[in-house]
Image (spheres, grey):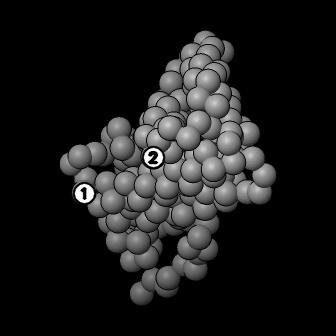
Amino acid sequence: MGRNKEFDVADALDRAMRLFWQRGYAATSMADLVAATGVARAGLYATFGGKHELYLKALDAYATARDPAVVARLAGPGPALPAVFALINDYASADEGRTGCFVVNSAIERLPADAAAALTVEASWSALEAALTSAFSRARSAGELRASTDPAALARMVLVLLQGLRVVGKGRPGSGRATDAAAQAIALITSLS
């Protein structure tokens, strides 16, 4: 009778998340997950369920770790627009752009067929949209934006821009596409002041 091997569940989940993020769901096999995590197939199944359940837990772990930091950054003290502009520039130039955002990658690969993944993607995007709407509302109240500016519509535009920056960032490094788009978006928002 074999004995169960002890392993760090959080570490295994993190390793699985990085593999799914890099390769995607379809291109990641259970054998790949066993190799990446160092956990036997039976241990992965017993702890996480099947491949799909592990994928969903990995996606949720990614969003849970990332989303609050972005929201807090936009809710910080001081003028709102510089925080939004810094976020846009970071999305345009971050190393994460090479692998994309795991949430965006999941949306591209798994939606609309994977309803469970869609819930995590939608929750992540909704949190970012709400934080952007709040930042633009504060900016409008502080006179950083014209009174006629619609914070919710502007937030949706920036949400779509940010997700697009992650997709374009996976392409040819140094092409200038992402940084040029970010600069134009910032110029457009600035023109609303």
Quadrant of the drawing holding the C terminus: top right
Residue visible at 61% across and 12% down?
A: 175
Assign a secondary structure to mark 1: helix
Identified by mark 1, the residue type is: Ala
Farthest right residue in view: 78
Total tally of numbered discs in the picture: 2
Using the rendered view, name the quadrant where residue 120 is placed. bottom left
Residues 36 and 84: in front is 84
Which numbered disc, 1 or 2, marks the residue that appears first in the sequence? Answer: 1
Residue on which the image places disc 2: 152
Q: Residue at x 31, y 54 (%)?
A: 118
User: What is the x, y in percent for residue 37?
Assistant: 55, 60
- Measured as percent of width and height from the top left, residue 169 is found at 56, 26
Look at the numbered discs 1 and 2 and tell me whether their residues touch, using CB distance below 8 Å. Answer: no
Number of other residues with Cα within 10 Å of mark 1, as a class: few under 14, some 14 to 19, many 20 or more: few
Res. 119 image quadrant: bottom left
| Vertical arrangement, residue 145 with respect to residue 46, above or below | above
- Which of discs 1 and 2 lies nearer the camera? The answer is 2
Q: Which residue occupies the extreme front position in the image? A: 147
Question: In this rendering, does residue 88 appear at all?
Answer: no
Residue 158 relative to residue 28: left or right: right
In the picture of the structure, the residue carrying the numbered disc 1 is 115
For badge 2, the amino acid type reads Ala
113 w.r.t. 153: above or below: below
Q: Position of residue 80 (x, y in %)?
A: 69, 46
Q: Nearer the viewer, residue 67 or 29?
A: 67
Residue 100: numbered disc: none
